[in-house]
Image (tube, helix red, strand yellow):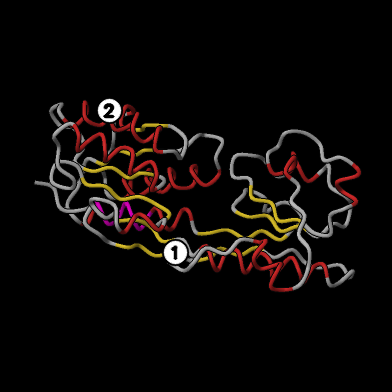
Amino acid sequence: MGKAVTIRHVASKAGVPVTTVSRAMNASGPVGRATRERVDGLVLMMPGVQPRDVVGSLAVGLPVVILNANAEDLAFDVLSVDNYGGARLAVEHLVKLGHERIAVLAGEESNYDASLRLDAWRDVLAEHGLSAPGEWLLRGDFSQRAGAAAGHRLVDLVHRPGGPTAAFASSDYVAMGAIAVVIAAGLGVPDDLAFASFDDIPISSCFNPPLTTVNVDTHALGTRAAAWLFERMATSEPVVPRHEVLPVRLEVRASSGPPR
């Protein structure tokens, strides 16, 4: 995975200022007039917030690029990573290894990225004639703490007859939290429970065991978002909104293996 590049890094290299509208990005209330007047352009990344709840408080004509959100019906540029396709790669990988009982460590229902990753898990299972009990869908946020909580539930499920032999975690942090608990309980990864996850954060390749995970090119995402924004800021002419989904790839490592 390439070195992460923030919007601030790219803006600095381009020689233009960047103002972060924290109230908008955190959905903590309307954006004040004084703040709006100091902003030349805005990149919004709000996977847990409906963009239309925020953009109504922005100045008309303000250049905006929206990242990873359900915003295709809005008149703004939308740039996303392939959450659905990437999750399909991870779950298909587990199925091809021979797993038929696959749990999912899903994100919060309000999180757009998490919802697409969960949809992929459901679709892949259905396409292969597989099913999972409702209790195999373990929800939480994208934190290690949520992963650890899910890990305790996984340990219980694995010890039951017909329990899961693999799990798809919607983020690497969740996978790490769960794996730590599973291993501490005396189970093997991947021997007793195989894992695949999403994001390919830098530590995922040196975690024990190294994570099989979907690689997201954050360098390309940040660079493309900034470039799009600068293009919009450079013209006052009406433009057609652009929608693009960036490809991802699966990095296969030691956390996944065939069922025993």
Q: Is residue 230 above or below residue 183?
A: below
Q: Does the magenta-highlighted stretch encompass residue 91?
A: yes
* Image vertical order of residue 143 relative to residue 197, above or below: above
Which amino acid does the dot numbered 2 rest on? His
Dot 2: element: helix
Crowd tier of the residue under label 1, counting other residues whose Cα lies within 10 Å: few below 14, some 14–19, many 20 or above: some
Cα gap from disc 2 to disc 1, whole angstroms: 30 Å
Which residue is tagged 1?
248
Q: Which residue is mark 2?
A: 152
- Looking at the image, residue 40 sits to the left or right of residue 203; the answer is right
How many numbered discs sit on the rendered protein? 2
Q: Earlier in the sequence, mark 2 or mark 1?
A: 2
The part of the image, by quadrant, that contains residue 199 is: bottom left
The magenta span reads 88-94
Q: Residue at x 29, y 57 (%)?
A: 206
The mark closer to the camera, 2 or 1, is 2
Asked which quadrant contains residue 1, the reply is bottom left
Residue count near mark 2 (Cα–Cα under 10 Å), binned few <14, some 14–19, many ≥20: some
Quadrant in which residue 48 is drawn = top right
Secondary structure at numbered mark 1: loop
Q: Is residue 145 magenta?
A: no
- Give the image location of residue 68, x and y in percent: 59, 53
- Residue at 86% of width from left, 72% of height from top? 235
